[in-house]
Image: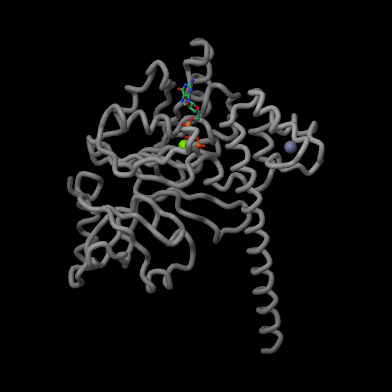
Amino acid sequence: MVLADIGFDKYFKDLVSQYKKENINVARVIKGHKKYYMIFDGKTEYLARVSGSLRHNSRIKSEMPAVGDFVLFRPSKKGELVSIKYILKRKNVLFRKSASKKSDIQAIAANVNYCFIVVSLDREINQNSISRYLSMVIASNIKPIVVLTKSDLCDNDDVLEEIEGIRKNFRVEDIFNSSIIDGQGMDCFAKYIKKTTTSIFIGPSGAGKSSIVNYLIGNNIQEVKSVREYDDKGMHTTTSRELFVLKNNAVIIDTPGLRSLGIWDNDSGVKSTFADIEEQSKLCRFHNCTHQHEPGCAIIEMVESGFFTAEHYMSYITLKNESSSLSKQNLIDMKKEKRQRIKKVIKSKKN
Ligand SMILES: Nc1nc2c(ncn2[C@@H]2O[C@H](COP(=O)(O)OP(=O)(O)OP(=O)(O)O)[C@@H](O)[C@H]2O)c(=O)[nH]1
Ligand SMILES: [Mg+2]
Ligand SMILES: [Zn+2]
């Protein structure tokens, strides 16, 4: 495999020629985790960090490398951390928008052709949230495709009705239903997921994004660049964005559920998706129960009795925890901003 197979085309080649003088290589970002990145040059994966100057020059998060970016890095001795020097100008970038602060905009992925908005048919379809996803994708100049998953759990007529409803209301590139159980609709992906294209899967937690990704990896295609980790129960809630190169050289990116899109700005998002759990939590002994360790917790009991699946419960806890740490971060940011504003006022009074 060479980089050209996975999206490194003339546009990027021309950009690289501007940097020719320096001794640097090109790679694509396949995973980002806090300070570290995995990058892939078509042959080898490297663990990478951004160089001091790149960090210094990026004022906002979205200027840091994102999954899908093509980056220039300086090679180092075998097994050593490499340093990302530049990000090649993106063709497009899917942003996560923050409701509170403009500078909080963060790149979910870069250089993407198709965005699959994955929604499950086993829950009530929320047209509002589809509309939010769509506007985000269209604003990023990426082609949106809606996939209604788990059609094996639904009546065929209901499925068709949902599809018609969405088709009528929204401007989508394509829309179809799918099922990893009976394989329905799975062939519809082939049209988009092919050599030199990059596709990303977004949508609520539990909608079936990773299941589709695994299906595509397993069926199309044998070679996988990163291996998924499952916990001892065989569950996997996606926690970071991951890029996979399929055997046909198509690139696909899996993402975690809604929370990655900053839609969990407050608890209300959690409440509406997990209304069933929230409703039952009235039965917990303590009104501020976190449903994780408290005695007399109705939710834990209902998970043990099988009323809620462990998976549904885990998604709920993960989202709740992340949503509260997100609010905490917002608070810290707001305080910082306030301090800076006050400093400015003091300064202007001095002058
Ligand atoms: N019946 C049925 N179940 C499905 C289908 N696709 C996925 N599931 C189930 O739905 C659950 C969630 O699927 P995932 O693929 O992990 O969902 P996800 O969108 O990746 O979720 P996050 O990583 O938490 O964002 C799993 O238990 C899957 O087995 C389907 O087509 N039919
Ligand atoms: Mg997942
Ligand atoms: Zn509880």
Which quarter shows the C terminus? Answer: bottom right
Q: Residue 299 at x, y = what percent?
A: 71, 32
Q: Can residue 171 be seen from the camera position used here? A: no
Report x, y in % for residue 290: 71, 43
Left or right of 293? Residue 164 is left
* Residue lying at 37% horizontally and 38% vertically, measured from the top left: 114
Taking depth in this image into account, of 274 and 160 the one nearest to the observer is: 274
Residue 124 lies, with reference to residue 137, above or below; the image says above
Q: How is the image coloured?
A: one colour
Left-right relation of 21 to 230? left
Q: Does 261 sit above or below residue 343? A: above
In the rendered image, residue 254, in percent from the top left (x then y), is placed at 41, 40
Q: Quadrant of residue 230?
A: top left
Residue placed most toward the observer, 233 or 113: 233
Choose between 161 and 326: the one closer to the eye.
326
Quadrant where the N terminus sits is top left
Q: Residue furthest bottom?
A: 351
Residue at x-position 71% and y-position 85%:
349
Residue 261 is at least partly visible in this image: yes
Q: Where's residue 118, x and y in %?
A: 47, 31
Residue at left 60%, top 27%? 309
Ligand 3 quadrant assignment: top right
Count of picture labels: 0
